[in-house]
Amino acid sequence: MSANNAYVIAGAGLAGAKAAQTLREEGFDGPVVLIGDEMERPYERPPLSKDYLLGKAEREAIYVHPESWYTDNGVELRLGVPVSGINAAAHEVGLADGSWVGYTRLLLATGSSPRRLPVPGADADGVLYLRRVADSDQIKAAFQAASQVVVIGAGWIGLETAAAARLAGVEVTILETAALPLLRVLGPEVAQVFAGLHRDHDVDLRFGVQVSEILSAGGRVRGVRLADGSHVPADAVVVGVGITPNSQLAEAAGLATGNGVVVDAALRSSDPDIFAAGDVACAYHPVLGRHIRVEHWANALNQPQTAARAMLGQDVAYDNIPYFYTDQYDLGMEYAGYVEPGGYDQVVFRGDVGQREFIAFWLAGGKVLAGMNVNIWDVSEMIQALVRGGRAVDPARLGDPGIPLDQL
Ligand SMILES: Cc1cc2nc3c(=O)[nH]c(=O)nc-3n(C[C@H](O)[C@H](O)[C@H](O)COP(=O)(O)OP(=O)(O)OC[C@H]3O[C@@H](n4cnc5c(N)ncnc54)[C@H](O)[C@@H]3O)c2cc1C
């Protein structure tokens, strides 16, 4: 049992590490305890499906801080031990090793977990998920041994993994229930760009299909059966069918939850001494005027800085425009803004879509809800300003590359 004046952070990922860093940068000199169920100190996940998976980045490059940072900054790092419960009345968290840690303020930064594939045979060896560094190591090894990989799910993780597999020289089939990749996030106009990208790299894309069973021999995956009875051979299967927030601790403690831990703009939960940030937080966004949960790196980097300040009693609100990026083959892009599935009435392109050098804007009632710059750089801040501005723009001018974005 540690002192009750501690600031405790459950979840030692990017969000947890950034919160600890901000507490120290803001001058907090009391105990900070960062508790994580993984054995690794906090690391960043984007390289796990990109440069680290491709063998282009060293393991050391993924960590948020050097190992010495935690002792140098007096942050007590407790790794390999999950937080198993919160006693909000007593201001304590219980750990799976039976110990208890008292807190003055608690941050939930427990992130999210991959959805499991709910079909028979999915427990076969060679059916792989990608969330942790060990998963990336396993997938990298599978790419070296495999000749045919099936990727289930054409979301960001599935597409990035498919690109890595192709670059490793493996044949890839992507199976997706929707009619296009990323359809819910991007809509058909821009989703087609990603379908074309993967087709150009000889990925076998199968849309509108339903996986009914994983086929194996001797416990090892051999292929995938589809609902129409057809069979796709595979010696490894990577599943990327979405993630769910790790909000079980909050639910069990009786906090408001629903698509994550429900928090206000200061990242405070329904318990005034408990906060949440990163993938697990469903936060009120003052610019968007609604609660959203953002499953992206920039949110896990920035949101905990606001949470830490709020934990210290500062009057703050998190209102960054949601932002994410992807790299696949030679396509790099940034996306800023937020669009509900089907929540736009127009897409405006600026630039050369065929060459994959363009900006796409999603509009509703003439207002820019989101923009995506593909292989065009140093424009995301201007796109974010358009989204934040919330005023109607002329679509013809928006689509004209001759008119600077900051003069619309
Ligand atoms: C392979 C991959 C590639 C990605 N690529 C991109 C990208 O290109 N662009 C982008 O914007 N985003 C990307 N993301 C998303 C981004 O990495 C996440 O949004 C980010 O990791 C969220 O950080 P977090 O700290 O909130 O959660 P996490 O990174 O999930 O960290 C939470 C930590 O808490 C631990 N934990 C959970 N429950 C407990 C408990 N009860 N007790 C103790 N510890 C617990 C978890 O094991 C984990 O270590 C990618 C994600 C993955 C997996």
Image (spheres, rainbow, N blue to C red):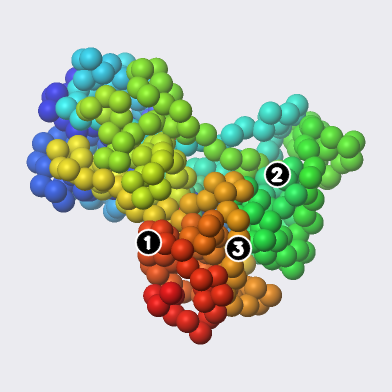
User: Quick check: 186 left or right of 386?
Assistant: right
Q: Where is residue 54 drawn, in percent x and y? A: 57, 60
Q: Are marks 1 and 3 in contact (CB under 8 Å)?
A: no
Check disc 3 and give the amino acid type: Val
- The residue labelled by disc 2 is 152
| 347 in relation to 126, above or below | below
| Distance between the alpha carbons at the discs numbered 2 and 1 | 38 Å
Helix, strand or loop under label 2 = strand
Q: Quadrant of the C terminus?
A: bottom left
Tell me how far mark 3 sits from mark 2, CA to CA. 28 Å
Looking at the rendering, the quadrant in which ligand 1 lies is top left
> How far apart are labels 1 and 3 at the CA level?
18 Å
Q: Residue at x 14, y 38 (%)?
A: 313
Q: Which residue is mark 3?
A: 347
Quadrant for residue 198, please give it: bottom right
Mark sitting on residue 368: none
Q: Earlier in the sequence, mark 3 or mark 2?
A: 2
Of the image marks 1 and 3, the number of the one nearer the N terminus: 3
Q: Which amino acid, by three-letter code, is at mark 2?
A: Ile
Q: Name the element at disc 3.
A: strand
| Picture residue at 11% right of the left edge, 42% below the top | 28
Q: Nearer the viewer, mark 3 or mark 2?
A: 3
Q: Give above or below for 363 relative to 259.
A: below
Residue that carries the numbered disc 1 in the rendered image: 389
In the image, 353: left or right of 336? Answer: right
Q: Quadrant of the N terminus?
A: top left
Query: Residue 59: percent from the left, percent from the top?
Result: 44, 55
Q: Is residue 334 left or right of residue 238?
A: left
Please, what secondary structure does the residue beneath circle 1 have? helix
Type of amino acid under label 1: Gly
